[in-house]
Structure formats: structure tokens, C-alpha cells
């Protein structure tokens, strides 16, 4: 079995609907990954332990999704130098603007690369992780270029009005 390269963590199983889009991209590219609930507020000790072990476990990036007062990405980033990619999950009352602000407004010195709210952000965080890994993996870079080319072809094939 290949060693796990990317960790996907989220604050609750209710984040899965969003975060599954990150996992789907990692699957598509054949990236060894793990996905689990690590809640900043409900299991802070587990969150610290996950972050503290990330580098020694060989993780190359951690994709962290959370909603509301979304401390998970920032607190993980505070405890590891493994790059953290933050995904704001749409919240019930503020539609994820709270999550976005919580994740993106990190104080100077502890970066979290922050993506769009919701499904697009989750997928793009995974694509960004793939791009990071592709720096050291020419075959993966080729796969990524193929993925882009397919998107281009699909856009060129679009007709208006859109097909039902
Ligand atoms: C956050 O609180 C989670 O990331 C989730 O987005 C939000 C709500 O969690 P649940 O009440 O649905 O478990 O910690």
C-alpha cells in the first residue's frame, strides 16, 4: 500500500457532503489519502495530536474543512509546518461567509491557503494538492494537464441555449 500523502479532515460528518468533492478528486488522481472527522471544538486534543504527527507520518498537505467558527484549519496550521489547505463549509445561518472569514483571516505568520466556500472550494483544494505533488511527479503532472485539457474540450463543446 502506498503511504498516505494527503490528509482530509473535517469538523463534523455533516461536512462530508462538501468535503467528499475533495476526496473524489484525490481518488480520481490515484492519490493515497485518508479522510476523518477531527473537530477543533469537540476533540481539541485529537486535533493537536493529528497536526503534531502529520510531518513524521509523511503527509504532504492537509485539506481541512469546517463551518461556522471554523478554527480547524488555522489550529492545525499552528501545530504543523505541513501545508494546510482550508475549505469553508457553508453554514446553516450565514451560508459559509462566517466559515470563510474564520479561515481566511489568519494572523501573519501562520498561513492557511483558503479556498472558495463549498463544493468548488473542496474540489479546488484537492486539485491544488495534486499540483503540489505534481512538482515532484512528472506522471502526475501529465494527468493534471490531461484533466485541464478535458475541461477545455468540454467548454468548447458547450452550445447555447444549454442542453436540458
Ligand atoms: C463545525 O460545526 C463543523 O465543521 C460543521 O460545519 C459545523 C456544524 O457541525 P454539526 O453541528 O453539524 O456537527 O465544527
Image: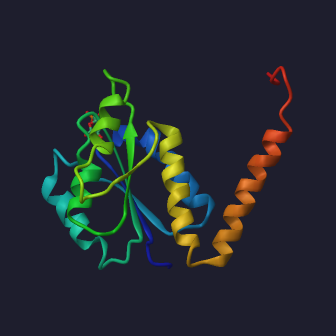
Where residue 57 sits in the image (x, y, percent)? Answer: 33, 77
Tell me the residue at 62%/63% (across/down).
Answer: 29
Residue 33 horizontal side relative to residue 9, left or right? right
Question: Which residue is pictured at 24% across the width and 59% down the height?
Answer: 109
Residue 124 on image: x %, y %: 53, 49
Q: Is residue 1 left or right of residue 75?
A: right
Q: Nearer the viewer, residue 54 or 117?
A: 117
- Say if 40 sits above or below 97 in the image: below
Direction from residue 115 to residue 39 in the image, left or right: left
Q: Is residue 156 above or below residue 49?
A: above
* Residue 148 sits in quarter: bottom right
Q: Picture coordinates of residue 4 (x, y %)?
A: 43, 72
Answer with the quarter of the image where residue 58 lies: bottom left
Quadrant of the image containing the C terminus: top right
The reply to whether residue 12 is visible in this rendering is no
Residue plotted at (52% across, 58% down): 128
User: Which residue: 29% across, 52% down?
Assistant: 73
Instruction: Name, please, the residue furthest toward the front.
Output: 108
Horizontal and vertical percent position of residue 79:
20, 64
Q: Quadrant of ligand 1?
A: top left
Tell me if residue 164 can be seen. yes
Q: Nearer the viewer, residue 15 or 67?
A: 67
Instruction: Please identify the quarter of the rendering in which residue 85 is found.
Output: bottom left
Amino acid at each position: 500500500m502506498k503511504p498516505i500523502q494527503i490528509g482530509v479532515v473535517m469538523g463534523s460528518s455533516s461536512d462530508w457532503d462538501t468535503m467528499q468533492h475533495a476526496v473524489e478528486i484525490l481518488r480520481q488522481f490515484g492519490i493515497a489519502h485518508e479522510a476523518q472527522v477531527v473537530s477543533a471544538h469537540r476533540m481539541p486534543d485529537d486535533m493537536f495530536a493529528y497536526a503534531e504527527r502529520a510531518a513524521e507520518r509523511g503527509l504532504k498537505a492537509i485539506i481541512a474543512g469546517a463551518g461556522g467558527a471554523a478554527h480547524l484549519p488555522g489550529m492545525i496550521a499552528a501545530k504543523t509546518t505541513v501545508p494546510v489547505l482550508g475549505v469553508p463549509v457553508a453554514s446553516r445561518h450565514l451560508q459559509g461567509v462566517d466559515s470563510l472569514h474564520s479561515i481566511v483571516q489568519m494572523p501573519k505568520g501562520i498561513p492557511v491557503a483558503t479556498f472558495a466556500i463549498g463544493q468548488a472550494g473542496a474540489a479546488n483544494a484537492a486539485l491544488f494538492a495534486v499540483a503540489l505533488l505534481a512538482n515532484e511527479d512528472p506522471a502526475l503532472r501529465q494527468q493534471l494537464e490531461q484533466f485541464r485539457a478535458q475541461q477545455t474540450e468540454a467548454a468548447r463543446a458547450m452550445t447555447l441555449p444549454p442542453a436540458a
